[in-house]
Amino acid sequence: MAPTRIVCVRHGESTFNAAHRLTGKDPGHVDARLTERGQGQVRAARAALHDIPFDLVVTSPLTRAIQTTQGIFGDHPSRPRILVEVLHRECQESSCDVGRAASVLAAEFPDVAVDHLPEIWWHAEGEPDAQGVHIEPRTLFDARVLGFRDWLAARPERSIAVVGHGTFFYHLTGVWLDNCQTVTFDPMAAPVPV
């Protein structure tokens, strides 16, 4: 039986988002963190999602998503289980989408279980581009989006929050989310063509 409610939450503003908005160029922020503005967006989202009784929160392993997850759900009244899931990391096309080793994340976020992740969990195959980023082929990304959709549909929890990324959510839901914006998603609906 599929979950009855899935709420997708894009992470708060990252240092990459802020710098890219100003210059239009990749600033080279590997695994970008939240800005102060992003932290404020997280506080507002925490208030907006406070009364929803989530059973599970699924977060991307990228730092900005983990920070958003901790900020929104760290003291949530329903005390949902938090699960880091690599399937819904961002489409790797910029420096901010390159991750950090699972052991590094474990040291920085000791309250978040990442021991099930491989040490290198992001796309690291083929030749990197001029900035050193291994661009994820679209076929692999599309397969991940569909795999995550199926993974969500098979979950036993009734109410799930998914904390992730703009491009991934756009390909999953057909909606482009601003930082900390939310959209309700039905994994049983027809896939969104984009």
Image (tube, rainbow, N blue to C red):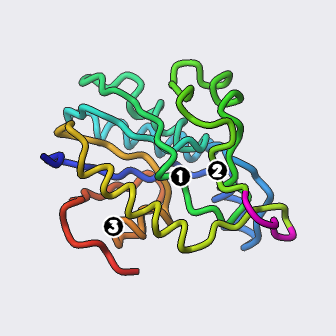
Q: Label 1: which residue?
A: 89
Q: Label 3: which residue?
A: 173
Are there few (<14), some (14-19), or many (20+) residues within 10 Å of tag 3? many
Residue 122: image tag: 2
Going by the numbered disc 2, the residue's amino acid type is Trp
Q: Nearer the viewer, residue 128 or 11?
A: 128
Going by the numbered disc 1, the residue's amino acid type is Arg
Are there few (<14), some (14-19), or many (20+) residues within 10 Å of tag 1? many
Residue appearing at x 61%, y 40% in the figure: 63
- Left or right: where 135 falls relative to 73: right
In which quadrant of the rendered view does residue 125 lie?
A: bottom right
- Left or right: where 168 falls relative to 94: left
Residue 186 sits above or below residue 61 on the image: below
Residue appearing at x 70%, y 67% in the figure: 135
Q: Are marks 1 and 2 in contact (CB under 8 Å)?
A: yes
Image location (x, y in percent) of residue 43: 43, 37
Say which element carries label 3: helix
Q: Is residue 72 inside the magenta stretch?
A: no
In primary-sequence order, the first of circles 1 and 2 is 1
Q: Nearer the viewer, residue 62 or 10?
A: 62
- Left or right: where 181 falls relative to 160: right
